[in-house]
Image (cartoon, rainbow, N blue to C red):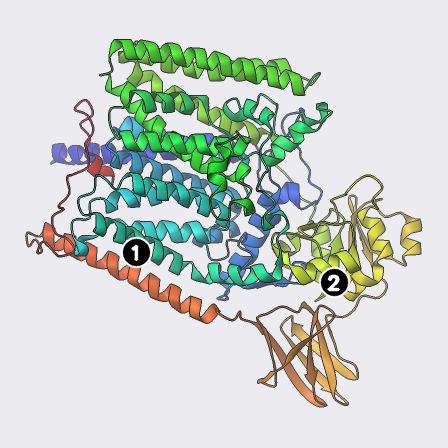
């Protein structure tokens, strides 16, 4: 019995080992954040004083896009709180004058994993879970393609710690995790033997739905292009082509239907929104050629935004602001091996390489080739130079997995191995020299630059040397290839984490507590303190906002009543246009009536930011102060609810009780926007507007007025999503029952859901790797 039990344990460990390896790589890749630093965006984005800084004195940042805090954390937490209180997260009253939450997409309001945001360290946990999902998806995809467990584990590790995850931790991060699962669903669909035995559609449906609900439709769309290309390339080898195509169409259709509440809300939002450059402004926007230097040597231009001050042309600052991540040298080297020396999946290898070339051509604006992806509908509305790298990395990582398999298999001809090893070494030298030349050209005199270049060259060159060595000395591949290529990904992933605040970190939350106790239903405006959307995080209403899209009426109110220099998507009191433009605090003094009309009661500033003379001139009164923050009270803020000739009381933002001597009109300082409805004593009332605010007529006497936001097509979209979800669950249950009947020795008829596949089985791993791919899929 003990022998049998031990064998079962060994068998279970063999099955679980690849997953445990990917889990271990994810944990090691985040080790600095988990133990030494605290990447909570609140510490760096809220503007609240903290007691710690980064570990290193050299300037740098731990992520490129501050929307990891301004939107991902703040709006995600706001949505999650509404969900756990049994409410649909449709509207956010704590941002600007109030604006759509679900329709804005970046909150990922219906994304199931957004609930993780409510946990201590929620953003880090959220990202760790998505990295693990991404890695396991890539692992299963490569196993499904017939790769050995070692090659698949490497591919899963590379995708779990890909360069987009490392550098962009805002909502861009979220949909990427589900790309390999869509591709895996396509592979499963290839084995559909009959109409009733259509496979993979349910996995495609789940992955598509989660991609769309994840909060960044641009990434979901671009990843979908790669998935479409994959599906077409894999079509010729399918025996039941029509079943395959219908299964995929059903999966996409069900996935889109499940995401319908978010998608339809978003579509209804756009005609009423300001979208900035997303109205066609990206057609000819490319990443500067100097950005190519850090594509394979990610930190050759220094830490994120660390050395841009030494570039007098500000080119590098623009590069950091427009880049979408990086690739590792090990991934690139193995991708070349996979493309050239791979023995299987020729059409897929060529398609993936072509996709990577087209993506890089569009990113860097290479003539002629860049125009191919420009033909894609909607491309001019998407910052493709930043967001294409995710699918490009996925394509190259699959090729890298095939390359690792070719090296590990050990059956390549000697001449081919020698030629490839030489080519990789020469290519690495060229890339390193060009990258070093670019760094020295654009960052003259930057501190530590030569050391940074040397370390970058040693890491990248060392990995390529290992790949070349394993090509030449085949027996070394099993022990060197996977650990060294994965280690490069881990090291590069760890680097930005050094610029998060060092643990332990204390946050000055006294200003927040003061506002929570004294603000009531009115608003504050922060001059870089309790920054944009952090009112949503803390449950206090703020005029500060950093979001896109934003309601067009709010955009006009900003420009005409608050700050004619401000950008509507970053109206945060901290952004300064520079030059001769007035500062944010000057604009408050000039347009004080506009702030008060919007219900702003307090101005939150750093200590000393508002001088005594300025405060006296604007008739501001100091209401709170501590070592780092001062809160100034404005002289005449408008109440949130008001009605001439009435006494008004309210316990929440969505209802008011009035006692009116005569007929009146109730004004509510919430943005007048399609989808809002009002009732007076339970009866529907016409909801009008006063300036940009909501207004409703009330007769004399005592009345209760309630407000509710419910967009026009929300009920239909919820019904559609519910029906699609029910169909998905029913389909999965039927397939499971059919498999159980087959396992019980009562095989169903050939046309039933669980019948025997009429297509050839997927290729199995080589004899040198006896593990069955079916064990992992």
Tell me: residue 631, above or below residue 385: below
Q: Quadrant of the C terminus?
A: top left
Q: Position of residue 543 (x, y in %)?
A: 71, 57
Most foreground residue, 234 or 369: 369
Q: Residues within 10 Å of mark 2 (few under 14, many from 20)?
A: few
Left or right side of 480 for 592? right
Q: Residues within 10 Å of mark 1 (few under 14, many from 20)?
A: some
| Residue mark closest to the camera, 2 vs 1 | 1
Left or right side of 675 for 149? left
**Would you say residue 63 is visible in this rendering?**
no
Residue, far front? 368
Residue, far left? 745
Query: Which residue is identified by label 2?
Result: 518
Left or right side of 247 for 440? right
Tell me: residue 742, above or below residue 639: above
> Which circle's residue, 2 or 1, is located before the other in the chain?
1
Q: Position of residue 305 (x, y in %)?
A: 65, 30
Identify the residue shown where x is 59% and y is 69%.
674
Kindly check if marks 2 and 1 are in contact, taking CB atoms under 8 A apart as contact.
no
Identify the residue shown where x is 36% and y is 43%.
227
Q: Position of residue 130 (x, y in %)?
A: 43, 43
Quarter holding residue 438: top right
Q: Quadrant of the N terminus?
A: top left
Q: Which mark is residue 250?
A: 1
Mark 1 element type:
helix
**Would you say residue 608 is visible in this rendering?**
yes
Identify the residue shown where x is 85% and y is 44%.
608
Tell me: residue 447, above or below residue 547: above
Mark 2 element type:
helix
């Amino acid at each position: 019995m003990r022998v049998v039990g031990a064998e079962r344990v060994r068998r279970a460990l063999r099955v679980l080992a690849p997953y445990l390896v990917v889990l271990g790589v994810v944990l090691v890749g985040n080790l600095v954040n988990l133990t030494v630093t605290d990447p909570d965006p609140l510490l760096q984005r809220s503007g609240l004083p903290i007691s710690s800084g980064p570990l290193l004195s050299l300037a740098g940042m731990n992520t490129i896009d501050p929307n990891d805090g301004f939107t991902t954390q703040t709006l995600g937490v706001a949505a999650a709180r509404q969900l756990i209180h049994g409410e649909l997260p449709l509207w956010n009253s704590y941002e600007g004058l109030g604006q759509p939450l679900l329709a804005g997409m970046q909150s990922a309001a219906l994304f199931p994993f957004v609930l993780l945001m409510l946990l201590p360290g929620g953003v880090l946990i959220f990202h760790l879970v998505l990295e693990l999902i991404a890695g396991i998806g890539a692992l299963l995809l490569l196993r499904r393609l017939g790769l050995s467990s070692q090659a698949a584990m490497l591919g899963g590790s590379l995708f779990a710690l890909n360069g987009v995850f490392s550098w962009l931790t805002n909502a861009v991060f979220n949909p990427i995790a589900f790309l390999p699962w869509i591709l895996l669903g396509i592979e499963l669909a290839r084995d559909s033997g009959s109409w009733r035995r259509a496979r993979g559609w349910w996995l495609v449906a789940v992955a598509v739905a989660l991609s769309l609900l994840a909060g960044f439709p641009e990434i979901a769309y671009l990843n979908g292009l790669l998935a479409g290309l994959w599906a077409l390339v894999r079509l010729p080898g399918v025996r039941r082509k029509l079943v395959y195509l219908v299964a995929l169409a059903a999966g996409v259709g069900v996935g889109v239907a499940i995401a319908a509440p978010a998608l339809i809300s978003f579509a209804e939002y756009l005609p009423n929104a300001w979208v900035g450059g997303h109205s066609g402004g990206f057609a000819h926007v490319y990443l500067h050629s100097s950005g190519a230097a850090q594509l394979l040597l990610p930190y050759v231009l220094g830490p994120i935004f660390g050395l841009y001050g030494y570039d007098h042309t500000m080119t590098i600052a623009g590069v950091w602001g427009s880049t979408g991540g990086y690739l590792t040298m090990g991934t690139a080297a193995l991708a070349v091996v996979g493309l050239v020396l791979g023995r299987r999946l020729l059409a897929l290898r060529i398609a993936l390489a072509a996709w990577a070339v087209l993506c890089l051509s569009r990113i860097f604006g290479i003539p002629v080739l860049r125009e191919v992806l420009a033909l894609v509908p909607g491309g001019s509305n998407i910052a493709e130079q930043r967001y294409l790298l995710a699918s490009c990395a996925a394509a190259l990582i699959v090729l890298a997995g095939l390359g690792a398999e070719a090296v590990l298999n050990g059956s390549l001809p000697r001449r081919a191995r020698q030629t490839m090893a030489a080519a990789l070494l020469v290519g690495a030298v060229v890339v390193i020299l060009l990258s070093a030349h670019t760094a020295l050209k654009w960052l003259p005199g930057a501190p530590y630059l030569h050391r940074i270049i040397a370390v970058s060259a040693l890491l990248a060159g060392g990995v390529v040397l290992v790949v070349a060595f394993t090509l030449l000395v085949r027996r070394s591949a099993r022990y060197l290839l996977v650990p060294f290529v994965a280690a490069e990904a881990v090291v590069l992933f760890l680097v930005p984490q050094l610029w998060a605040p060092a643990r332990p970190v204390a946050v000055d939350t006294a200003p927040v507590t003061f506002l929570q106790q004294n603000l009531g239903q009115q608003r504050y405006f922060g001059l870089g303190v309790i920054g944009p959307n952090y009112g949503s995080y803390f449950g206090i209403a703020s005029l500060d906002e950093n979001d896109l899209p934003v309601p067009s009426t709010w955009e006009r109110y900003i420009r005409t009543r608050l700050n004619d220099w401000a950008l509507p998507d970053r109206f945060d009191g901290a952004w300064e246009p520079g030059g001769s433009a007035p500062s944010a605090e000057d604009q408050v003094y000039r347009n004080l009536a506009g702030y008060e009309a919007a219900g702003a009661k307090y101005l939150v500033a750093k200590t000393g930011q508002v001088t005594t003379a300025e405060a006296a001139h604007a008739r501001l009164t100091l209401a709170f102060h501590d070592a780092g923050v001062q809160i100034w009270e404005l002289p005449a803020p408008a109440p949130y609810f008001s009605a001439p000739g009435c006494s008004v009381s309210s316990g929440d933002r969505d209802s008011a009780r009035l006692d009116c001597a005569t007929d009146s009109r109730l004004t509510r300082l919430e943005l007048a926007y399609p989808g809002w409805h009002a009732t007076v004593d339970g009866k529907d009332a016409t909801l009008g507007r006063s300036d940009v605010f909501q207004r409703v007529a009330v007769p004399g006497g005592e009345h209760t007025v309630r407000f509710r936001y419910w967009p026009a097509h929300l009920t239909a979209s919820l019904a559609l999503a519910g029906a699609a979800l029910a169909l998905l669950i029913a389909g999965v249950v039927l397939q499971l029952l059919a498999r159980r009947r087959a396992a019980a020795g009562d095989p169903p008829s050939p046309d039933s859901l669980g019948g025997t596949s009429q297509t050839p089985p997927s290729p199995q791993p080589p004899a040198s790797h006896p593990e069955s791919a079916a064990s992992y899929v």
